Amino acid sequence: FGSNAFKANDWSLQWNLLVLFKPNLTTCSNTNISLINIPANATWIQNGMTVAGSNGKGIGTNQVNEPYGLFLDDQQTVVIADQMNHRITQWKNDNKNNEQVIAGDNGDRSALNQLNQPTDVLIGKETDSLIICDHGNRRVVQWSCRSGAKEGIVVAGDQGTGTALTQLSYPYGLFNDTLYTLYVADSWNHRVIRWIQGVKQGTVIVGGNGAGAGANQFSVPVALSFDRHGNLYVVDHDNNRIQRFSIE
C-alpha cells in the first residue's frame, strides 16, 4: 500500500479457507445479522468449523483462491468474494464441498460478465441482487441474484482511473444503507464516496485531501461501517488506524 500500493495478489499471506466460530448463546429465529443482539459477555467456542474452502488454492467447486470479503444471508448461505478466481460464489449452510458460482468466473477482464479481483460483496434485498466491489476494474456492479443472470450492470465507476466524481481508483470496501445509498472506500483516491441510487456520479463525504495522516486525510482506506447513530468508521490501512467521523 501507500506509495507502493498493491493489489491483493501481491500478498505473501494467502487465506484459502473460511472458518466459522459459533457463539455460546441462542439467538432468535430471525437470522438477519443486523438484528442480532450479541450480549457484551458472549464467548465463542475456540475451535472453528470450516464452512468453505480448505482444499488448497484452485478453481474447483470445493476451493477458493485468496477470498477477501463475504456476506451472510438470512438463510445462513455464505456469499464470498473469491478474489483471485475473479468470481462470487455461494456456499449453502453445512455443505462446504459444493459451491455455486453466482457472478463472474469468466476471466479477469472488464466485460459486464467478468470481474477482476472482487474484494467485497453485499446483497441488495430491494433489487434481489448482489452489489460487488469490482476492485481491479475500478467499479461497483450490481448483479441479479435471479437464476440465469449472465452479467452485471455498472452502478459506480468504470470510467478509468482518476479523481473525478465519476471515477473510482481500486476500491476495496462497500456499505449499503436502508435508503439503498452506496458508500465506497475509494482506496487509491484516499476518500470515502457516496453514490445515491440512479445518479451518474458520487459525492465525497470524507477524505479526498490527498494521502496523509491528517485528521481529514486517509492513506488507502479499505473498509467502512456506520453505527446506529450514523457515525462513520473507516479502516485507514496505511496509517494503521481506525477513524471515526461523527455525523453532524
Image: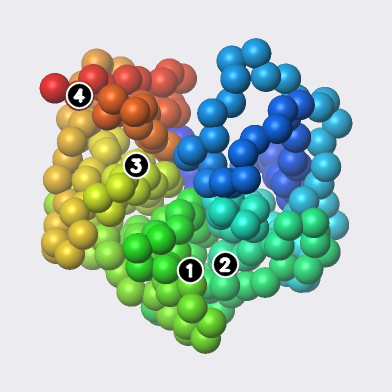
Residue at 36% across / 27% down in the picture?
227
Q: Are marks 4 and 2 in contact (CB under 8 Å)?
A: no
**Marks 3 and 4, the one that precedes in the sequence:** 3
Which amino acid lies under the numbered mark 2 shown in the image of this protein? Arg
Q: Position of residue 122 (x, y in %)?
A: 45, 54
Is the residue 22 above or below the residue 39 in the image?
Answer: below
Of the residues shown, which amino acid type is indicated by label 3? Ala
Compared with 180, 12 (above or below) is: above
Distance between mark 4 and mark 1 Cα atoms: 34 Å
Figure label count: 4
Give neighbour class at mark 1: few <14, some 14-19, many 20+ (Cα, 10 Å): many
Q: CA distance from mark 3 to mark 2?
A: 20 Å
Q: Quadrant of residue 37?
A: top right
Q: CA distance from mark 1 to mark 2?
A: 6 Å
Q: Where in the figure is residue 25, as x and y percent of width and height?
A: 72, 28
142 relative to 24 in the view: left or right = left
The residue where tag 3 is placed is 185
Describe the element under mark 3 as helix, strand or loop: strand
Residue 148 falls left or right of residue 210: right
Residue that mark 4 sits on: 247
Q: For this rendering, which residue is in front, 60 or 41?
A: 41
Q: Earlier in the sequence, mark 4 or mark 1?
A: 1
Residue named by callout 1:
115
User: Callout 1, which amino acid?
Assistant: Leu
Q: Nearer the viewer, residue 234 or 214?
A: 234
Q: Residue at x 42, y 37 (%)?
A: 223
Quarter holding residue 235: top left
Q: Secondary structure at mark 1?
A: loop
Is 199 or 113 nearer to us in this picture?
Answer: 199
Question: Which residue does the numbered mark 2 point to in the structure image?
Answer: 87
